[in-house]
Amino acid sequence: MPRKNFNPKNFELDVDHPWTMAIHTNDMVVLNPQLDLDHPDDLTAQTTISLDHIRKLLADIDCAVFDITNLRVSYVNTGDVDEDTYRQSILDQMPDLAGATLEMVPFDRLVLPELLVEICTYAMRGQGGEVFAKATADPRGLYHPGAPLSQGVKCGQMIYVGEQVARSPSGEVLHPGDLTAQCAAVLDQLEAVLSDLGADLADVVRLNLFYDVSTSTADRAACCDMLKARFGEATPALTAIPLPRLYPTGKQIMLSAWAMRGAGGARLEKHYAGRADAPLWRHAVACGDMIITGGISTIGADGTVGAPDDHITQTSQTMVRIDTLMRDLGGRLQDVHKTNSYYVLSTVDEFNSNLQTRSDCFEKPGPGSVGLPLDALSHPGQRIEVEAILVKAN
C-alpha cells in the first residue's frame, strides 16, 4: 500500500522543515509529536490541547483513539510533578485508549523554555479502513499503569510493550537505587508480557532503555552484560539514553519494546545491518515491513566520539550512517517515517542550526520528527543520537 502523508498545521517552527504531521503506510500510523505553544508553562493546558490535537489528527486521517497502540509522553519534571497523578490525568481524558501502551519520559526541559510536554503516537489501522483486533497482556504480579492501558498489546504483526519499571503492584519501587537488580526485574517483566502475547525476546526488534544519569559506569556495564546474556544472538536495535532523573525516587531504569510475530504465531525472519565489531547491539534490524535503527551517533568501534562537541558535523555524519543502514536493508533515509533525536544543545540558535542540518537531509514530505534536549549523552563530547523507524510500502 502506498505511503500517505497528512500535514495539517497545528504549530510552526522557526526553520522551514520537511516534517509531516501524520504518515500512514500499510497498517501503521505514525503521528508527529503533538504540542501546544499557546499556554506557556502550563502543563495541564498543554497536555489537554496536545491530546485534543491527537484526536483531531486521527479523525482527519479516518482513524480513532481506539486505534492507538502506543503513546510516548515526553514532559518536563524537575521534581514538581507527581508522575503517577499526571499519568492518571491523561488516562482520565483518554478513556477510549482501549489497551494501548504508554511511556512517560521526564526531562529537565524541552526544546522551547515554555514548552512542557510533547506526545508521540503510533496507531494501527488498515488503509482501507479496516479496524484491527487487539490482544492485550497484563501479567499478574506486575505494577500496572492504570486502565484503559495494558502492559502489552498485539495488533496484526506488531507487539508493543509499554514502559516496564521495577515497582510492586501497589507502586513501591523495588530495589531502590540498584540499577542491576532493577534491570533484571524489568527484563523478567518484558519476558512475561511477551509470553502472554505468544512471543519471546527473540522477537524483539526495538528496545528503548532510559536510565538515571547518576548511575555508575560499572553498574551500566553490568546491565549491558545482562542484556547480552538475555538476548543472545537475537539482539534488537537498542537506544539507551541517560535522563537527569526518573520518578518516583529510587527508580533507576525503564524499558519499552517493540516485537513482531507473524500470522498464526509464526516467527518472522530478521535481517541486520551495522558494524561487525559491535556484536552486542545491532545498529539496524529489518523484520516484515519494518526497518528500525537503534540510537545512531558518531561513536566509533573504540568508543571514541567522532567530531567531539561539534553538533553540526556529528548530525551530518549520523544521518549519513542512518541512510547507509537503511539502504543496506532495502530502504532509504527519505522513506523514514519517524526520527527521534536526543541532543546536547544549549541555545535556541543551536537548536535551529541543528534542526536545519537534519531538515536538509529530507525532501518534503519528510518523516515525523522529535528532538529532545539533554545536558549529557552516554559519552563525553557526544552531542546527538538519532533513532529511525521506516515502514516499507507493500
Image: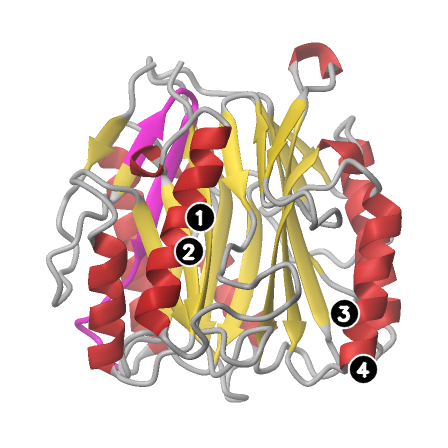
Tell me the tag on residue 177: 4
The residue type indicated by label 3 comes to: Gly
Label 1 near label 2: C-beta < 8 Å? yes
| Nearest-to-viewer mark from 3 and 1 | 1
Q: Which residue is mark 1?
A: 321
Rendering quarter of residue 212: bottom right
Between the residue at mark 1 and the residue at mark 4, the CA separation in whole angstroms equals 36 Å
The answer to whether residue 327 is above or below residue 341 is above
Corner quadrant of residue 118:
bottom left
Residue under numbered circle 3: 171
Of badges 4 and 2, nearer the viewer stands 2
Which range is magenta? 23-40
Of mark 3 and mark 4, the one earlier in the sequence is 3
Give the quadrant of the C terminus: top left
How many residues crowd around disc 1 within 10 Å: few (fewer than 14), some, or many (20 or more)?
A: some
The residue type indicated by label 2 comes to Thr
Crowding at dot 2, Cα within 10 Å, few <14 / some 14-19 / many 20+, comes out as: many
Q: Which residue is mark 2?
A: 318
- Tag 1: residue type? Arg
Q: Is residue 26 magenta?
A: yes
Q: Earlier in the sequence, mark 1 or mark 4?
A: 4
Q: Is residue 219 visible?
A: yes
What residue is at 51 percent from the left and 82 percent from the top?
81
